[in-house]
Structures are given as structure tokens and as C-alpha cells.
Image (spheres, helix red, strand yellow):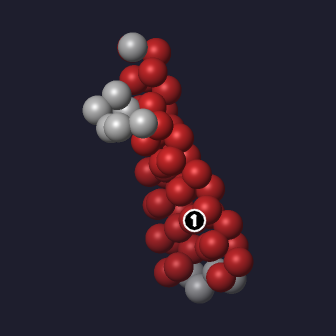
Amino acid sequence: MKADKDKTLRKLKTVKGQIDGLIKMVESDRYCIDISNQLMASISILKKCEHRCPLLPP
């Protein structure tokens, strides 16, 4: 159980960094495809976290 919690926290911290990066990308007018790729990576990690949460239905 603790290992799952640690993995989930690590993934959430990764997404937090990606979101901070996304904000900077939007502020600096980066190409939409670059922003889209970063968004898709963040969403993918969040979906993995969702599946690890014991409080959510499978």
C-alpha cells in the first residue's frame, strides 16, 4: 500500500512540474503541437494515478 502511495505521489509531482512547464509554454507562445504533446503526457500520467487510487471504482 505504501509503495502505491509513493508511486502515485511521484507521478503527481511529475505532473505538477509538467503543468508549470505548460504555463510557461503558453506564456511564451510556444507552438500548439508542443503544448498539445505536453498536455497529452500529463493526462496520461493522471490517468495512471486514477487507476491506482483505492477510493475510486475500477
Which residue bears the numbered disc 1? 39
Could you tell me the amino acid type at mark 1?
Leu
Q: Quadrant of residue 25?
A: bottom right
Q: Position of residue 56 (x, y in %)?
A: 33, 38
Residue 13 visible within the image = no
Kindly identify the residue that appears in the image at 47 percent across and 37 percent down.
51
Kindly identify the residue that appears in the image at 62 percent across and 56 percent down.
41
Pick the residue in front: 13 or 56: 56
Which quadrant of the figure contains the C terminus? top left
Q: Position of residue 49 (x, y in %)?
A: 46, 39
Q: Label 1: how many residues lie within 10 Å, few (<14), some (14-19) or many (20+)?
A: some
Pick the residue in front: 45 or 54: 54
- Location of residue 19 with respect to 7 vertically, above or below: below
Kindly identify the residue that appears in the image at 35 percent across and 37 percent down.
57
Q: Position of residue 42 (x, y in %)?
A: 55, 55
Pick the residue in front: 10 or 21: 10
- What number of labels is visible? 1
Residue 46 visible within the image = yes
